Image (cartoon, rainbow, N blue to C red):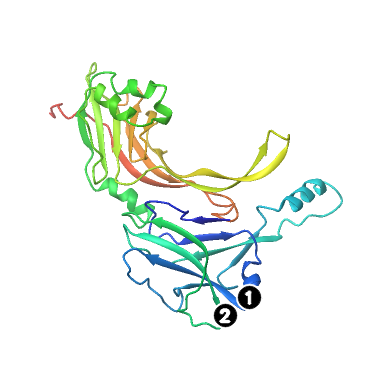
């Protein structure tokens, strides 16, 4: 039904357990009936063997002890139509019926490594290390950081930089029609037109506050946030949609959903005006509201809760990881008494 990481995903956090959701709880029983078992095998481009322990073996077996049943979320067309017709009638409908199973593979992964994730079919009596035909395959790549928390911490390892900018030049970028979805070199070209030199993406996180001349004192105008990995990320999951033709026809489609975002965090002053995200999500120009001098800017990476039963669950909430927490006291050229 879905897998995190998804096929082709880049910069995966290597210490985040792999999560696989199957659309039927019968996946294990079907193969068991034919004397087969399923197992998850990971292959690294480095050819290094993955760790295998008694509690978390590799290959990772898909057995009743590792497959967790969960409540119905995505129903077959027949069952979905039946539930819709019977809802509100005298016929009871159980909300606890099981229709899916999930498994979590807590095997730590190496950074900067390509992986192939296979679900294999082997004989039930085969040795634990045996391999067999691949029934499902997924490929992904890990990034530098093992967790979102470590990614957020990388922004705090270097001090916040400060620079001068022409009055109104950077704020004007946030008013451009393309600012909500910058493409190609639109953001870089606009920053050059505003008087900045071409700024390549650095190998480490960087935060620059731009100040402009003001009366009676300089004012912070914008903040440039650079990162060595995407600060915005999306995944594809099944979502129910209602088609316009024929009317009221419902179906499930794989849609791209945001699960990691960067933006203003509560706890500081509400001074962010616009966030202009560069393609790739590794750079953002944040324009500030007037009179932001002396106020506190807080930015965070937000792990968006995916409340589907087969992902984070209905009780999941968003998690914030602070990347910037700084008070905009004065411009760098101001003298300190």
Residue 107 visible somewhere in the drawing: no
**279 over 260 or under it: above or below:** above
User: What residue is rendered at 66% in x and 58% in y?
Assistant: 71
Dots 1 and 2: beta carbons under 8 Å? yes
Q: Which residue is more in the foreground, 153 or 251?
A: 251
Q: Which residue is more in the foreground, 251 or 310?
A: 251
Q: Residue 326: give x, y in percent of width and height.
A: 29, 38
The N terminus sits in image quarter: bottom right
Q: Earlier in the sequence, mark 1 or mark 2?
A: 1
Q: Is residue 299 left or right of residue 303?
A: left
Give the labeled residue for mark 1: 32
Q: Residue 41: give x, y in percent of width and height.
A: 45, 69
Give the labeled residue for mark 2: 124
> Dot 2, crowdedness within 10 Å: few (<14), some or many (≥20)?
some
The C terminus sits in image quarter: top left
Q: Is residue 109 left or right of residue 214?
A: right
Query: Going by the picture, which residue comes out furthest to the front?
Result: 133
Q: Is residue 196 left or right of residue 79?
A: left
Q: Residue 195: give x, y in percent of width and height.
A: 22, 23
Q: Is residue 259 left or right of residue 211?
A: right
């Amino acid at each position: 039904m879905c897998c995190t990481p998804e096929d082709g995903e880049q910069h995966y956090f290597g210490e985040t357990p792999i999560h696989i959701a199957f659309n039927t709880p019968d996946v294990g029983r079907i193969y068991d009936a034919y004397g087969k078992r399923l197992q998850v095998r990971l292959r690294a481009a480095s050819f290094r063997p993955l760790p295998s322990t008694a509690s978390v073996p590799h290959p990772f077996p898909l057995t009743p002890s590792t497959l967790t049943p969960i409540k119905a979320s995505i129903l077959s067309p027949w069952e979905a139509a039946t539930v819709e017709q019977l809802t509100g009638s005298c016929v009871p409908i159980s909300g606890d019926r099981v229709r899916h199973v999930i498994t979590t593979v807590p095997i730590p992964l190496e950074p900067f490594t390509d992986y192939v994730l296979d679900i294999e079919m082997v004989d039930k009596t085969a040795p634990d290390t045996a391999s067999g035909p691949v029934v499902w395959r997924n490929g992904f790549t890990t990034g530098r950081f093992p967790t979102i928390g470590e990614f957020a911490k990388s922004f705090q390892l270097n001090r916040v930089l400060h620079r001068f900018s022409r009055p109104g030049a950077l704020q004007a970028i946030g008013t451009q029609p393309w600012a909500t979805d910058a493409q190609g070199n639109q953001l870089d070209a606009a920053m050059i037109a505003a008087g900045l030199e071409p700024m390549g993406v650095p190998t480490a996180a960087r935060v620059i506050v731009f100040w402009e001349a003001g009366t009676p004192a300089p004012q912070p105008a914008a903040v440039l946030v650079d990162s060595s990995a995407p600060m915005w990320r999306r995944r594809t999951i099944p979502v129910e949609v209602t088609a316009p033709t024929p009317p009221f026809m419902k179906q499930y489609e794989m849609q791209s959903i945001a699960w990691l975002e960067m933006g203003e965090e509560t706890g500081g002053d509400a001074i962010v005006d616009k966030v202009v995200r560069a393609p790739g999500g590794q750079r953002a120009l944040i324009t500030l509201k007037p009179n932001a001098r002396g106020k506190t800017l807080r930015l965070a990476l937000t792990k968006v809760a995916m409340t589907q039963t087969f992902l984070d669950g209905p009780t999941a909430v968003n998690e914030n990881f602070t990347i910037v927490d700084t008070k905009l006291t004065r411009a760098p050229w101001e003298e300190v008494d």
